[in-house]
Image (tube, rainbow, N blue to C red):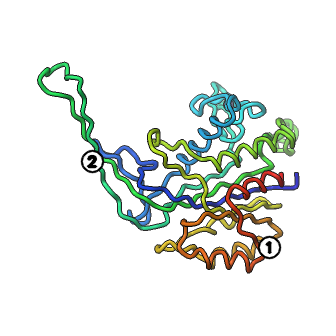
Amino acid sequence: MNIKCITVTWLAKADLSSLNSGQGSGNINELKLYSYGTKPYVSGQSLRTALFQTMDRMYEGAIKCIPEAPCGDVENCWACDLRGYLKPEEGTGGTRRWSPLKVSPALGQLPTEIVSDLLTRHSYIEKAEDKKSKDQRIAHVQLTENVYKASIVIDVVNIGRVVEPVIGSEKTKNSMEGWKEVVNIGDDERRVRIKAVLDSIFNLSGFAKQARAATSLAPQLVFATIKKTYNQRGLNVLELDDAGNAKLDLLESALYEAKTLGDEVFIGFTPGIIENEDEFKQVVGENGEEILPVVEVFNRLKAKL
Ligand SMILES: [Zn+2]
């Protein structure tokens, strides 16, 4: 496989929701905020968890352990391979693996009003200690709507592959002599796992506290690249200004850089996500790229593997 790296940056519009809110003091669900408290965000950890929940739902049996008790079997367990793990072991200090998926937080792009919703829950079950009153509970939930931007970088070469340092003998003063490959699942199985990651991004759902809500952060406007060199460049490409316009100078410089380096670019579009749709499409067209439906971007990425 000649591909070193796949980057996927996307925008997703979320309706009034409390994605990734933390448990605040008392009965308040507080949103995580940045930019001096004006914009909401969803942590990279939360995005990563949702990604693996989505994968687990689609590929039954591929994930063989939970993060709290990793099995460490990179060859057979997609979670240990793709999520990475830290596995403490007595005596040796344990083993660890860095994830070959680099996941950004999802950053709300628009300064928006935060709505505080008062939830009351009435129960018909009488309190045991006081038979006269009904049980009533109150909670505040902070809600907001926004357009979120997120990115995932897939380190293609290191999917299903583990290398260990080779340490020299006493005579060479324990110096490192090189690297030894101890696991390599091969390109066919690697393709299967990369496709699973792409499918999981496309179908992304399963966020914390969304058990009863339909909000997801599945891509609606997407900028994906296939690179021959591993890097994490160009992930700011779909940033919006405060009015909801895509920053065209960032788009232009990302397209220029991709063209110069020979990276392949795939742009997927859904109407109603950004304000300056016509100008966005114009810049894409002027740079010789095509506007595709989002599903087509993912189909083309998978076909290139
Ligand atoms: Zn595992």
Q: Could you give the CA–CA distance between mark 2 and mark 1, rounded to whole angstroms?
A: 51 Å
Question: Furthest residue to the left?
Answer: 132
Q: Is mark 2 within 8 Å of ligand 1?
A: no
Percent position of residue 248, x then y: 62, 77
Between disc 2 and disc 1, whose residue precedes?
2
Where residue 140 sits: x, y (%)? 29, 47
Tell me the kind of residue under disc 2. Leu
Q: Amino acid at mark 1?
A: Lys
- Residue drawn at the location 39% of the way across and 52% of the way down: 31
Residue 212, by quadrant, is top left
State left or right for residue 111 relative to residue 278.
left
Find residue 227 and name its label.
Answer: none
Q: Is residue 165 toward the left or the right of residue 91 in the image?
A: right
Q: Label 2 belongs to which residue? A: 118
Report which quarter residue 40 is drawn in.
bottom left
Q: Residues within 10 Å of mark 1 (few under 14, many from 20)?
A: some
| Element class at badge 2 | strand
| Residue 14 shows in the view | yes
- Closer mark to the observer between disc 2 and disc 1: 2
Label 2 environment density (alpha carbons within 10 Å; few <14, some 14–19, many ≥20): few
Residue 167, visible in the rendered structure? no
Quadrant for ligand 1 reads top right
In the displayed structure, would residue 252 be above or below residue 192? below
- Residue 169 in the image, given as x and y percentages of width and height: 86, 36
Whether disc 1's CB lies below 8 Å from ligand 1 is answered no
**300 and 42: which one is in front?**
300
**Whole-percent x, y for residue 298 in the image:** 73, 54
Report helix, strand or loop for mark 1. Answer: helix
Residue located beneath label 1 in the image: 259
**Residue under the image location 70 percent in, 49 percent down:** 198
